[in-house]
């Protein structure tokens, strides 16, 4: 059985920043996430403080098992980032359910666009309606590192 977002039984979604296990999330991202390896704790704390934060928690232990954050102006644009699922619970649909719950959390704001970048999880996000950019030639980026 699962909830409205497809969250597997035994897990719950929360948008409460106070529930985020910041130490655990930093450890996950800085040691295991290809996009964030080596991220300093200072940078991590600043990112958490400046974003909407979401977690998935084991309902029996209360432990956090997944994380995502969104950088947004809450009006027009959002960037879904740092989506991470603890390796021991991968393959249960938690990542897809987390992303679905984040999208639904943002829906009332009427954002015009929610973007993300992924190296290897296109299928997960495609299930939720994410598509490649129609005109990638119109997008540019500035890298500071």
Image (cartoon, helix red, strand yellow):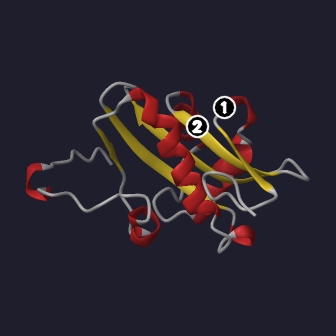
Q: What percent of the width, then of the height, locates residue 128?
A: 43, 58
Residue bearing mark 1: 17
Element on which disc 1 rests: helix
Q: Nearer the viewer, residue 10 or 115?
A: 10
Real-space CA distance between mark 2 and mark 1, rounded to the nearest whole angstrom:
6 Å
Residue at coordinates 15% horizontally, 49% vertically from top-left? Answer: 139
Crowding at dot 1, Cα within 10 Å, few <14 / some 14-19 / many 20+, comes out as some
Horizontal side, residue 76 vs residue 23: left or right:
left
Q: What percent of the width, then of the height, locates residue 12?
A: 74, 49
Residue 7 visible to an observer of this rendering = yes
Residue 120 visible to an observer of this rendering = no
Closer to the chain start, of discs 2 and 1, is 1
Above or below, 96 against 69 in this view is below
Q: Nearer the viewer, residue 96 or 72?
A: 96
Q: If the image is split into quadrants, where does the N terminus sit?
A: bottom right
Crowding at dot 2, Cα within 10 Å, few <14 / some 14-19 / many 20+, comes out as many
Residue at coordinates 37% horizontally, 58% vertically from top-left? Answer: 129
Residue bearing mark 2: 53
Q: Quadrant of residue 55?
A: top right
Element on which disc 2 rests: strand
Above or below, 9 against 120 in this view is above
């Amino acid at each position: 059985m699962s909830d409205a977002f497809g969250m597997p039984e035994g897990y719950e979604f929360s948008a409460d920043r106070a529930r985020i296990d910041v130490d655990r999330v930093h450890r996950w991202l800085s040691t295991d996430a290809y996009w964030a390896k080596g991220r300093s704790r200072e940078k991590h704390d600043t990112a958490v403080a400046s974003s909407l934060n979401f977690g998935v928690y084991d309902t029996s232990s209360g432990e956090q098992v997944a994380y995502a954050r969104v950088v947004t102006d809450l009006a027009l644009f959002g960037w879904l980032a740092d989506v991470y699922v603890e390796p021991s619970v991968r393959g249960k649909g938690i990542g897809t359910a987390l992303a679905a719950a984040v999208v639904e959390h943002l829906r009332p704001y009427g954002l015009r666009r929610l973007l993300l970048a992924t190296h290897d999880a296109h299928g997960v996000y495609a299930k939720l309606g994410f598509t490649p950019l129609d005109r990638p030639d119109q997008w540019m980026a500035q890298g500071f590192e």
